[in-house]
Image (cartoon, helix red, strand yellow):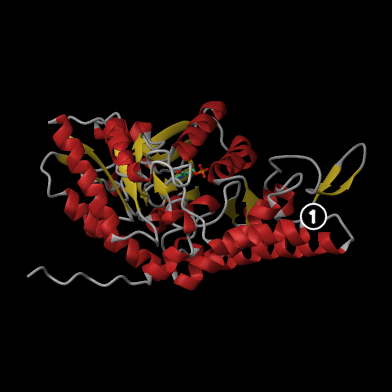
Amino acid sequence: MEPAQEPYPLDVEAIRADFPILDRKVGGDATVPGEDEDDTTPLVYLDNAATSQTPDQVVDTIADYYRSYNSNVHRGIHQLSQEASVAYEEAHDRVAEFVGAAGREEIVFTKNATEAENLVAYAWGLNEIGPGDNVVLTQMEHHASLVTWQQTARKTGAEARFIRVTDDGRLDMDHARELIDEDTAMVSAVHVSNTLGTVNPVAELADLAHDHDALIFVDGAQSVPHMPVDVREFDPDFFAFSGHKMCGPTGIGVLYGKERLLEEMEPYLYGGSMIRKVTFEETQWEDLPWKFEAGTPVIEQGIALHAAIDYLEDVGMERVHEHESLLARYAYDRLSEFDDIEIYGPPGDERAGLVSFNVDGVHAHDLSSILNEHGVAIRAGDHCTQPLHDVLGAAASARASFYVYNTREEIDALVEGVDDARQLFA
Ligand SMILES: Cc1ncc(COP(=O)(O)O)c(C=O)c1O
């Protein structure tokens, strides 16, 4: 008899009902209703680390904003502007509460996590880093952080150093202790690797950085959507994530920064909304966080991010994490059944909800297009971690990544498609 399967920690069917896109069929001419029905197959969406799907609650919030109170913020005396301003400002409060920040002063809305990295690199890095300094990154940084700090180091004459990844996909903390020294200005570390699924010891890295009077930037793009995160527990100086990976819309990212640092920093963009007083000679900046939100900000996106956080907290972030861990273990075990598949990163019970792998003799792009014929959407390529792929000795990999609405049956569909590809290329 088959062993009983562990029950899901959340009500997957109820959650799926909030995401009508998951009922879509793909393949054939699926865009034309009723045509080529026989060639279509149910969508299995396993590309959540790139962008997650958006529940009705968030879509409705966006529609409601445009239908009921679409208006520019901070400027108008009229009612619509006041309603939009209150909703937009409250979105900052909600995000602050969600990640344990002291208040809206510490929460800057950006276009995405990448822009948050760049904001700090430009506004802090170019002014504070100089020749003789070093910037310490990990080999598993996403390009959003790696390229940004590599180029900041280049422009300022500093050295970029990289903490090694061990053979089992963890950070080599002995190497971190060697690299972080009294000349370190900034440590930038990814919280959860979008390729390996590794959850990094960011509290330990923060202690190391602070012991050497350096700052630490933590990239939370793959942690905030998937697990409870409280900045008070690991004390980053800066922390960033993106709305579109956590049931929110595209076009919004968040920069958390310690108030003292944000106060000291020069603005990154100049223009309207970020000023208090302007004369022909000089300008006084607006209070935080508006000092960093020049021009018309991401109003609809901020309000929708608020709704996405409400949605995720209704599900419960602990349960989100448990569900994804269960799926990651299941996918890891199922893919491990094949001895011609190499899975990257730590074992199944120690990883976040994604699995990157390669099938011997099958390029990740070919695998992805065969899976696409099975209706299974995964990511193939370097996942914006080219240098990490060099370390792994692979030009590319296939990545399946999970979220609250995914099921074991969908992972079975993935494994079936992978097996087909194996046989086709055998
Ligand atoms: C770990 C990590 N950091 C940063 C990013 C960049 O996010 P965005 O493209 O939303 O700026 C991503 C996106 O895949 C990511 O996975």
Q: Residue at x 87, y 40 (%)?
A: 282
Question: Would residue 268 appear left or right of 146 to someone viewing this image?
Answer: right
User: Residue 382 placed where, x, y %?
Assistant: 36, 34
Q: Nearer the viewer, residue 26 or 160?
A: 26
Q: Residue furthest right?
A: 280
Q: Is residue 156 visible?
A: yes
Quadrant of res 140: top left
Question: Would residue 96 appear left or right of 264 to someone viewing this image?
Answer: left
Q: Quadrant of the C terminus?
A: top left
User: Residue 338 placed where, x, y %?
Assistant: 12, 45
With respect to residue 141, does 307 lie above or below?
Answer: below
Q: Nearer the viewer, residue 15 or 137?
A: 15
Q: Residue at x 33, y 61 (%)?
A: 324
Q: Residue at x 44, y 47 (%)?
A: 34
Quadrant of res 8: bottom left
Q: Secondary structure at mark 1?
A: loop
User: Callout 1, which amino acid?
Assistant: Ser
Question: Would residue 65 appear left or right of 346 to someone viewing this image?
Answer: right
With respect to residue 336, does 19 lie above or below?
Answer: below
User: Residue 18 placed where, x, y %?
Assistant: 49, 64
Q: Is residue 241 visible?
A: no
Q: Quadrant of the N terminus?
A: bottom left
Which residue is disc 1 drawn over? Answer: 71
User: Residue 330 placed where, x, y %?
Assistant: 22, 58
Quadrant of res 319: bottom left
- Cβ of mark 1 under 8 A from ligand 1: no
With respect to residue 266, does 230 lie above or below?
Answer: below
